[in-house]
Image (cartoon, grey):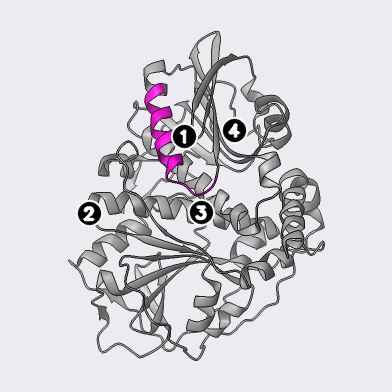
Amino acid sequence: MTESILTLNQKYQERYIKKRYELFREEILPTNSNLITYVNEEKYYLKSGTLFAQLFVKLFSLNWMSVENPYVFHTLSPSARGKNSNRIILEYKGSLFEFHLSGNFFRLIVGKVPKSNDLDIDLKSANIYLVGDINNIGHIYGSFGWTLSLLDAGHQIEHCRQLSMLYKFNVRIKLFPQYEMSSLCSIYNQKELFPIVKLYFSSKKNSLFPIESKITCKQKLQMEPSGVFDEILTYFMYHAGKEITLEKTMFSRFSFNQIHMRMSDQSNQGLSFFPYYIKRNDLVSLAKMVKELLHSFNQEIDIYIISKISPFNKEKWIINKHSIQREPVDISFNRVIHDSLDFLNPQEAALVVWASVNKRKSHSDSMSDCGESLIEAARCLHCISLFFSDYDRGFRVRTLKNINELFFEKVVSKNKNLALYMLIGGKSMNTQMQIPI
């Protein structure tokens, strides 16, 4: 058993880190199809004024728009191409509802038909599942879309933790709740819908309700010719996830203003930066925040930061849960991304951040640890984005997976680490109006 897990994780790293760009063209991409049918045509809304309604709107609803952005509508947590491909499933008193963020309404998947169209939900009795829709993200990114769904889930989890500190409630998560979801509804034995995380707000364990499925699968998955992706999803169907309490920390707590102002900048003209330099005192504060956050994680994540502190000087910071290291470095930012240099010019960026894992240790990790590392990488970069959201007017950050992994591995980490996720930030040349919805 151990040998097969090790082999799978190494296959994943080879296929989706080292060779994902060259092998992408081999995939047969699925069309984006509707996998779910509903009990009726009714639209259900959360009863206004309740704590759950306030929380849910801030967690998942569209909150603002930017007409100069190719992805016009936005939630408060970022998503690959603004697709929000993770389906949001609410389980309450044995019924499952899917949330449609474009209209702030729910549709009933299975269970009893509510007596009223206004759902009065008790926070402590509700469970929220984030379910990766493999076809939705896969028709653009192929089987690599699964990785992006994990990163999206990490952003959503961290966003929920931030709100829990502001609203003063406790939140727990369960990673990869495949068994639980298949008990609730039989479609989750299929691989097109991939339960990533359960969010719940009480330590009380809820009983499972065996519900007859009203979901139909209209399409078979046809993406991964090498079989690695199928092996990954099969693995998660038979491995129960961890239950985790999201810790409330001091340095990584942010205000409503910072949460609302966070922007993963993008524009039709591309993203370029003015020359800008970050004060060392601010980098020290950032490093302390990152170290505190990493200390609350299960996985061993290393954060590499290269920042400009003057026109001629850059510094490399290496942060983990045990230490903070700093050293001078001479690295060109032009080499940090894999492609799309016509749309993103990193040369004048003020800083580049990588979330990474140790190469040697990661080879012995299970596939569950690998998935959790991606989720925690997104959580950390989400906090770094919030840190800079009110840093200075015009300072913008963008998280992305378009990484020159070979450059990071050989030049930045000196053959020690593999990059999971990246953030670029600086004084943006682009000005965008953020219009509340």
The numbered mark at residue 152 is 3
Task: Check disc 3 and give the amino acid type.
Answer: Asp
**Which quadrant of the view contains residue 422?**
top right
Label 2 close to label 1 by CB (< 8 Å):
no
Q: Which residue is mark 1?
A: 397
Q: Which residue is mark 2?
A: 168
Task: Check disc 1 and give the amino acid type.
Answer: Val
Label 3 close to label 1 by CB (< 8 Å):
no
Q: What is the C-alpha distance between the residues marked 3 and 2?
A: 24 Å
Whichever of callouts 3 and 2 sits on the residue coming sooner in the sequence is 3
Which marked residue is nearer to the observer: mark 3 or mark 1? 3
Residue 108: x, y in percent? 40, 82
Nearest the eye: 98 or 244: 244
Residue 397: x, y in percent? 46, 34
Whichever of callouts 4 and 1 sits on the residue coming sooner in the sequence is 4
Secondary structure type for disc 4: loop
Which marked residue is nearer to the observer: mark 3 or mark 2? 2
Q: What is the C-alpha distance between the residues marked 2 and 1?
A: 28 Å
Label 3 close to label 2 by CB (< 8 Å):
no
Task: Check disc 4 and give the amino acid type.
Answer: Leu
Compared with 374, 433 (above or below) is: above
Nearest the eye: 65 or 303: 303
Q: Which residue is mark 4?
A: 344
Task: Check disc 2 and give the amino acid type.
Answer: Lys
Q: What is the C-alpha distance between the residues marked 4 and 3?
A: 21 Å
Secondary structure type for disc 2: loop
Any magenta on residue 114? no
Whichever of callouts 2 and 1 sits on the residue coming sooner in the sequence is 2
**Which quadrant of the view contains residue 189?**
bottom right
Q: Most prominent secondary structure in the magenta stretch?
A: helix
